[in-house]
Image (tube, coloured by chain):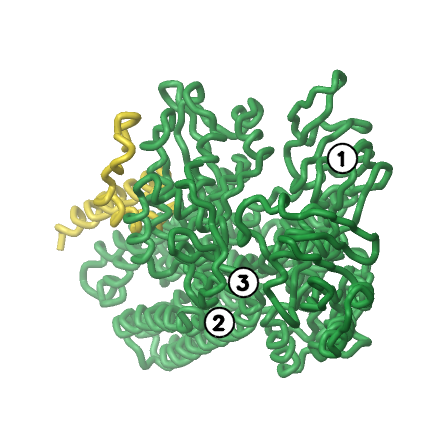
Amino acid sequence: MQMHGQVPSYRPSIDPATACKHCELPVGSHPVVSEGMAFCCTSCSLVYAALAGAGMDGTYYRLRDMSSDRRSTPARTDADALELAELDSDTFLAENTRETDGGERTVELFLDGVHCAACVWLVERLPYEMEGITEARLDLPRARLTLRFVPEAVHLSDAARWLARFGYQARPSRAAAVNEQTAAERSLLIRMGIAWALAGNVMLIAFALYSGLDASLDTQLATAAKWMSFALAVPAVFYGGSVFYRRAWASIQQAWKSRTIRALHMDTPISLGVLVGFFHSAYATVTGVGEVWFDSITVLIAALLTARWLQLRARRLAGDASERLLSLLPSMARRIGQGGHVEVIRTSEIRHGDLIEVSAGEVVPVDGTIAMGVSAVNNAVLTGESRPEPIAEGSRVEAGGTNLTTTIRIRTSASGDETRIGRLLAWVGDRRSTQAPVIMLVDRIGGYFVTAVLALAVLTSVIWLFLEPSSAATHVAALLVITCPCALGMATPLAMSVAMGRAARAGIFVKSEASIQELQKVGAVVLDKTGTLTEGNMRIVDVTGNQTVLADAALLERTLNHPIAVAIVRSQHGHTSGDGSSLVSDLAAEAGRGVQGIVNGSRLVVGRPDWVASKCADALPVFSEAASLYAEQGYTPVAVARDGFLQAVIAVGDALRNDAPELVARLRQQGVEVHLASGDHPEAVRSVANRLGIPLERAHGHVTPEGKLAYVEALQERVPVLMVGDGVNDAAALQAAAVGVAVEGGTTASQVAADVFIVRPGLQPVLELLSGSATAMSTVKRNLGFSLGYNVLGASAAVAGLVTPLAAAVAMPLSSLAVVSMSILQRSFKQREDSR
Amino acid sequence: MTILYLLVPLAIILAAIGVGAFVWAVRSGQYDDVDTPAVRMIVDDLDQPSEKHAPGTNGNRP
């Protein structure tokens, strides 16, 4: 890749609040400076250089600044070599691409990192920049890229690599699941459109009947109008409404089998109401005696279908995203064949006893023992332990861990679903599919509502037949029109889908509206530590003394694989220029103590404070105080001395997120019990609990994934539990909790298991979720209250004979309009826009 | 009022044509993504190839 030759260099004089030239996030205390511009990380500077190099920077940044609701994220420019290999494999081409005319194929890829108009422009330039790609279409909200390409002329991996230069991560998508979802959504939309078209026409005819056609002399025309609406209602009832009868029938069978009335779900009264209304009206039409209610029935069907479609659409954003991330375990692996040559195969083809090679930075695909190599693995995904674990020949490794330092070879003992992580994921998958579908609030009310209206209609006709038989029909008609359930049917789904759409824009993906409801009842919160309350990796948390020695310390430590050395080196990443190893001599490491050597001509000692102090002439008390303070806080203190003088004490550890105290404080304020369950060392858990003010009897360390599940289930017997976590070790608990929230940076498994997942860093979004869902629920209640109130008032007036059918027909759309505007004007999930 | 016997069925035929168009639009995927086209509109005007890459490689963008 062209880089204009310059290497980003370290300039300490830049204000940490300066916006990164590329992503516009604050650059922080270690900015990367290139050509006089500040970036937050090397990747952002690389993307900026790539854009400038291609002459596309002007348009890109102009378009981006025009987009109002973009999400800032630092760029990632590394492409996963194995994922790229999968894109080119014949099996992938055969399974996930479609042949179109002229020997071209189309493929759908998920694209991470697209967020605004500029991304659409940049990504859709692909055909201009690369031979063999004929069309690129980006679906922005779903982050889905459709490519048409000539398989002979271009490798998909090259396209993915081109996209990666600009910070977009292309991932293979599984075509089958996506197509099924699209087909379901399209068919529901068609059903809804047809239902509304029929309902609209039936209503027009009904208006004519209500405004006196029936009573006029032209009875022939009135009869024709009734037959016409009958004809229009038939497809509405039998095609449009068939989804309700099917589900109602299934629930009746279920109830019959289990002998519980509770299994009957709310499609049953809806179906009953619709069918009774329809057959009564049909009978009235055929015999010419009685009232027809085709308009109410068809509008009800259309309104309920709309509600269902809105829900499906609101959910798909979250559903798509979890499908996009459904690749926790690598799908490709490198196997060492018989003759020692390396072959890239799909992980499903790995057999027991195969030798698998895993490079540094890759995820271990199998359970097994190390056959060759010395490295360290980070098992945070599995266990929640933030410290990397050293491994050598003979040690056991588990799938899901990340290999950190050098290439290793693993003798497979289990692969796929037989691995520990595979079993956990299978459990989560099973639970998801067996969980009962959530009963929608609108169905529940809607069903009873129809029954109540029909009963009222009978009541009204009976009353008025006694009082004044000639006007009975008019009053019944007015009742049916004024109680049209449009407003009621749309009250909940509309408010929910507006809230969920806003939340998704703020990076909070809510998978089902039931979670928004459940969140209001939560009585206890179980928090994970590593990666949730903390940032999830070892880094320098604090420095007492001279910060500039860190650069030299990093030079000294860069050849070492110790986690603390890695943390020190990473803190200086991208800020040192050139190859520093030539400046280091006399390097000597002492296990468990530290390391010393000559850097830039001066003797440097880095290690345990007492060991370093013993090598120094004198140590200021401020340093020993700092060291003991860090140790108390659960960090590892490390001292740095230069030429026999102690220069600095640094705290290395997994830092608490800035917004963690606020989250805990807010939860306690709301009277919610806060619990902490972590797989990490109890000492580390206790120190975090202390700082957050969580009672120690509610903070537990060394909790296994199974233990977390049991903990949540035990709590759940008392109160509904909100679980916040990020790792695979949290997945089962997230699934079991009333509401599971997976925070940013979490693993696929946690995102699949969770009810809500967040793609914005930090814990602030969790706070937004809590307040936003409360607002959304109060909007729903206001909507329901309003439409029920309207209907009760309208119905009583109609039963009393105070409303004419025409007045009712005018009042009806007004109530729907009120509900729609209340839903759109709600204030949930607005904080972020205000703060920007 | 006899004209209604003609006008109402005529109106319903027109409605049926509308519904047909709607079904076609949904089936051809026009409702799958309703956000990106709004963005693409501002993009299309700017879509001249950049200086460093001549459009020669491929010009048949739809």
Per the image, label 2 sits on a secondary structure element best described as helix
Which chain is yellow in the rendering?
Answer: B
Q: Earlier in the sequence, mark 1 or mark 3?
A: 1
* A701 left or right of A748 in image: right
| Residue tagged 3 | A513
Disc nearest the viewer among 1 and 3: 1
Q: Chain of mark 3?
A: A
Picture quadrant where residue A827 is located: bottom left
Q: Nearer the viewer, residue A67 or A632?
A: A632
- Residue type, numbered disc 2: Ala
Task: Determine if residue A90 is in view.
Answer: yes
- Residue type, numbered disc 1: Ser
Per the image, label 3 sits on a secondary structure element best described as helix
Per the image, label 1 sits on a secondary structure element best described as loop
Question: Are dots 2 and 1 on a single chain?
Answer: yes
Which residue extends farthest right? A394
Residue at image coords 39%, 29%: A148
Q: Chain of mark 1?
A: A
Q: Which mark is residue A776?
A: 2
Which chain is green in the rendering?
Answer: A
